[in-house]
C-alpha cells in the first residue's frame, strides 16, 4: 500500500503552492466588504421607514443597495478563492458573471434615479404618471433580467484554468473568437 500511495502521489499533476499572505488590496477589499455591507444595510433600513417607503427613489436605492451587497460579497469570495487556492471548476459563472450583472444594475439604477429626478424638476406634474411604483418595479425587473442575459453571453467563453483551478480564464487563444468577444465586444 505504501508503493501505491507514492505512485498516486507521483501521478497527480496538481502543484501545491504555499498560501501567500494578504496584500494591501485584499485587506482594503475586506474593509470595503465590512463597511460597504453595513452602509448598504443601514440604507435599506432607512429607505424602508414609513416616511421614505412611498417614494420611487427609495425603491431604486434599495435595489441598488442589494445589488451592491451581492457585488461586494461575491468579489470578496472570488478573492478568497484565489488566496486560499480553492478549486472552483464550474463556478466561474458565479464568481465572474453575477458580480458583473450586479455592477451593471447598480450603475443603471443611478441613471434611472437621475432621470426620475430630472423629470421631477422639469415636469413635476408628470413624474407621478411616468414613474409610477408599478412602472419602476417593471423597469428594475427588466434591467435585472437584461443584465443577467447580457453577462451570461460571456459564460460560453469562460472556464476554470487547468493549471490554476482557482482562476477563471477565457477559452481559446489570444486572437480567438472568445478572447475578442470578451475583450473588445462585451465591454462596449
Image: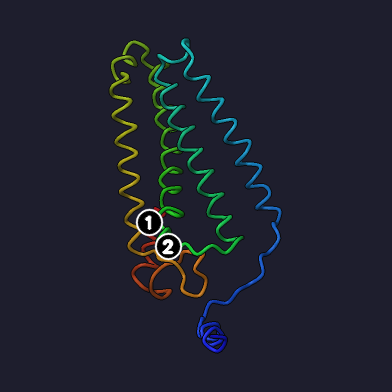
- Looking at the rendered structure, the secondary structure element under dot 2 is helix
Image quadrant assignment for residue 54: top left
The residue under label 2 is 183
Asked if 51 appears above or below 103 in the picture, the reply is above
Q: Are marks 1 and 2 in contact (CB under 8 Å)?
A: yes
Q: Dot 1: few (<14), some (14–19), or many (≥20) neighbours within 10 Å?
A: few
- The dot on residue 186 is 1
Q: Residue at x 44, y 49 (%)?
A: 100
Q: Residue at x 32, y 19 (%)?
A: 133
Q: Residue at x 45, y 55 (%)?
A: 96
Q: In the rendering, at what x and y percent does residue 16 appear? A: 60, 74
Choose between 160 and 116: the one closer to the eye.
Answer: 160
Query: In the rendered view, does 80 fall on the left or right side of 87?
Result: right
Query: In the rendered view, does 128 fall on the left or right side of 74?
Result: left
Q: Residue furthest front?
A: 1
Query: In the rendered view, does 153 fall on the left or right side of 42?
Result: left
Image quadrant assignment for residue 55: top left
Q: Residue at x 49, y 68 (%)?
A: 165
Q: In the rendering, at what x and y percent does residue 178 appear? A: 36, 67
Amino acid at each position: 500500500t505504501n508503493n501505491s500511495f507514492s505512485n498516486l502521489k507521483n501521478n497527480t499533476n496538481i502543484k501545491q503552492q504555499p498560501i501567500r499572505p494578504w496584500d494591501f488590496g485584499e485587506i482594503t477589499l475586506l474593509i470595503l466588504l465590512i463597511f460597504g455591507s453595513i452602509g448598504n444595510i443601514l440604507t435599506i433600513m432607512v429607505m424602508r421607514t414609513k416616511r421614505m417607503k412611498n417614494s420611487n427613489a427609495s425603491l431604486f436605492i434599495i435595489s441598488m443597495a442589494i445589488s451592491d451587497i451581492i457585488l461586494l460579497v461575491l468579489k470578496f469570495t472570488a478573492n478568497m478563492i484565489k488566496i486560499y487556492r480553492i478549486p472552483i471548476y464550474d463556478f466561474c459563472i458565479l464568481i465572474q458573471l453575477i458580480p458583473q450583472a450586479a455592477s451593471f444594475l447598480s450603475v443603471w439604477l443611478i441613471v434611472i434615479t437621475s432621470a426620475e429626478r430630472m423629470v421631477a424638476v422639469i415636469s413635476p406634474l408628470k413624474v407621478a404618471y411616468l414613474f409610477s411604483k408599478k412602472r419602476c418595479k417593471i423597469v428594475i425587473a427588466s434591467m435585472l433580467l437584461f443584465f443577467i442575459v447580457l453577462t451570461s453571453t460571456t459564460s460560453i467563453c469562460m472556464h476554470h484554468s487547468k493549471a490554476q483551478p482557482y482562476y477563471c480564464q477565457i477559452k481559446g487563444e489570444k486572437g480567438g473568437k472568445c478572447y475578442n468577444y470578451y475583450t473588445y465586444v462585451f465591454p462596449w
